[in-house]
Image: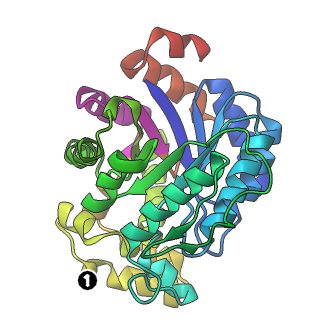
Amino acid sequence: MKFSIRLNNDLPVGEYIALAQAAESAGFDQFWVSNDLFLRSAPVILAAVARATQRIEIGTCILNPFTINPAEIAMMAATLDELSEQRFNLGLASGAGEFLKWVGITPDAGYGKPRTALVESVRAINALLAGARAPCDGGFLHWTGEAYLRFAPQRRVPIYIGATSPNMLRAIGEVADGGLPLLFPPEHYAAVTPYIQEGAAHAGRDTGAIDVAACIWCSIADDRAAAEDALREKVAYYGPAMSPRIWERLGLARADFAPIERAIMVENDVTKAKALVTPAMLRIGVVGAPRDLIARLEGLAAMGARHLSFGPRLGRTRWRPLRRWAAKCCRTSGGADHAARV
């Protein structure tokens, strides 16, 4: 069993260094940081983390090919991989449409279809990181034969695709080394894997070679009220931008999030927005004490998950639970080898 942690890019840089060191000490395998617009830069954060750690893998969750050109993504990936001594993983996705609108980008309106843009970008970046030229005249990329890195990358960096929709999940199976499917709620893993398997079968690939992280949201604290409050903030910020499939799975609709979106984006009133988050919305993640998390993890392991990825938020005290989580997770879902590292 593999274990990883995912964090938003909304903390001071120094906190990521402390969290990454704690995660590495606790035996976690990977440390991911998002790159949401107008917050701190994930590549810069990960550069600092790379210099402060020795073993743990680092990664972006996620970059998108609309706000950063795939050529620059390849440059960044190769450089971070060199800096981290081949510990970097590149997480890519099409980006959230609601957030892309902030900078005037509307996929399908002159920028190319999201899936086409993502798949073409993955293939081009793979070529560049393999030291090859990457000419492309597709639906999104229009590169000449001069598209190649002017330095030698140390390896072809593994690419993970972040996904929620069936088409993007199939893309994980078709072209990615790994997947970061968001599971809202966690039990959605059973509905995710068939699409990944379908994509792999179409491409003639073995799904066993694809590292699919079961990405869940969790807010863990012995004080349940504190745990719920932390998760409410994340749901308030990201809930309005989630896909209709997620809303439907929870028995919700976009209209349910409209007052929350207005409170947090227009009125800038986080307290009001959190108060509008309903119990049904909190089912997006796992909230409560460590024992509540373990019970849900055992269910994921029973479904076949071999990589458990804990997403923000980690509870009010962010780094103290890490060692305890790792130890409990290993005893219930991991193996002796991983437990030994903890």
- Answer with the quarter of the image where residue 128 lies: bottom right
Q: Quadrant of the C terminus?
A: top right
User: Which residue is situated farthest in the front direction here?
Assistant: 145
- Residue range of the region highlighted in magenta in the rendering: 287-310
Q: Is residue 286 magenta?
A: no
Residue at figure coordinates x 58%, y 56% from the top left: 125
Q: Residue 276: horizontal and vertical position, in percent?
A: 36, 75
> For the residue marked with disc 1, what is the amino acid?
Ala
- Answer with the quarter of the image where residue 247 lies: bottom left
Residue neighbourhood size for the residue with mark 1, other residues' Cα within 10 Å, grouped as few (<14), some (14–19), many (≥20): few
> Is 332 placed above or below 17 here?
above
- Answer with the quarter of the image where residue 13 lies: bottom right
Residue at figure coordinates x 16%, y 66% from the top left: 251
For label 1, the residue is 255
Q: Residue 290: horizontal and vertical position, in percent?
A: 43, 33
> Is 270 placed above or below 209 here?
below
Q: Is residue 178 left or right of residue 30?
A: left
For residue 316, say whether it is visible: no
Q: Residue 29: horizontal and vertical position, in percent?
A: 57, 30
For residue 154, say whether it is visible: yes
Q: Nearer the viewer, residue 35 or 276?
A: 35
> Is 222 placed above or below 238 here?
above
